Image (spheres, rainbow, N blue to C red):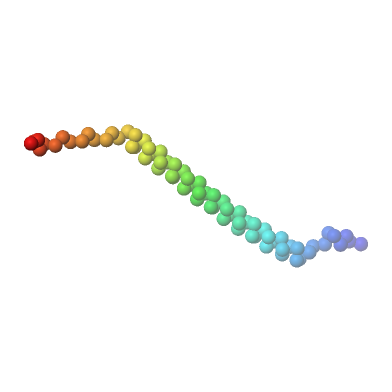
Amino acid sequence: MANPWLKKNPFMSMWLSAAHSVASTASCRIASRAKRQTHAAIANTAGAAVGYWTNALLTKPKPRKSRKPRR
């Protein structure tokens, strides 16, 4: 006599297939969101670094002396 626990269950197979599909979709969405956030953080950091060094290396121009004669 065959063991009834080893028989295939079509409902369990369908349920597991659907669960796998949902988990796969969720995993892909989570990975893409993490990738977008990583790229945004890198771009923000690079922009801040460039802005910092650009402002640090540029000197402010000296104010011009007025040519108007004093009274």
Figure check: 50 above or below 12:
above
Query: Residue at 57% of width from left, 55% of height from top?
Result: 29
- In x, y percent, where is residue 8? 79, 62
Q: Report the residue that reaches farthest toward the right.
A: 1
* Left-right relation of 66 to 20: left
Which sits in the foreground, 22 or 63? 63
* Left-right relation of 33 to 22: left
Q: In which quadrant is the C terminus drawn?
A: top left
Marks counted in the figure total 0
Figure check: 57 above or below 37:
above
- In x, y percent, where is residue 58? 30, 35
* Left-right relation of 9 to 25: right
Query: Residue at 61% of width from left, 54% of height from top?
Result: 27
Q: In which quadrant is the N terminus drawn?
A: bottom right
The image quarter containing residue 47 is top left
The image quarter containing residue 59 is top left
- In x, y percent, where is residue 2? 89, 61
Which sits in the foreground, 18 or 30? 30
Query: Residue at 67% of width from left, 58% of height from top?
Result: 20
- In x, y percent, where is residue 57? 32, 33
Q: Report the residue that reaches farthest toward the bottom.
A: 11
Query: Residue at 67% of width from left, 62% of height from top?
Result: 18
Which sits in the foreground, 44 or 17? 44
Q: Report the residue that reaches farthest toward the front.
A: 71
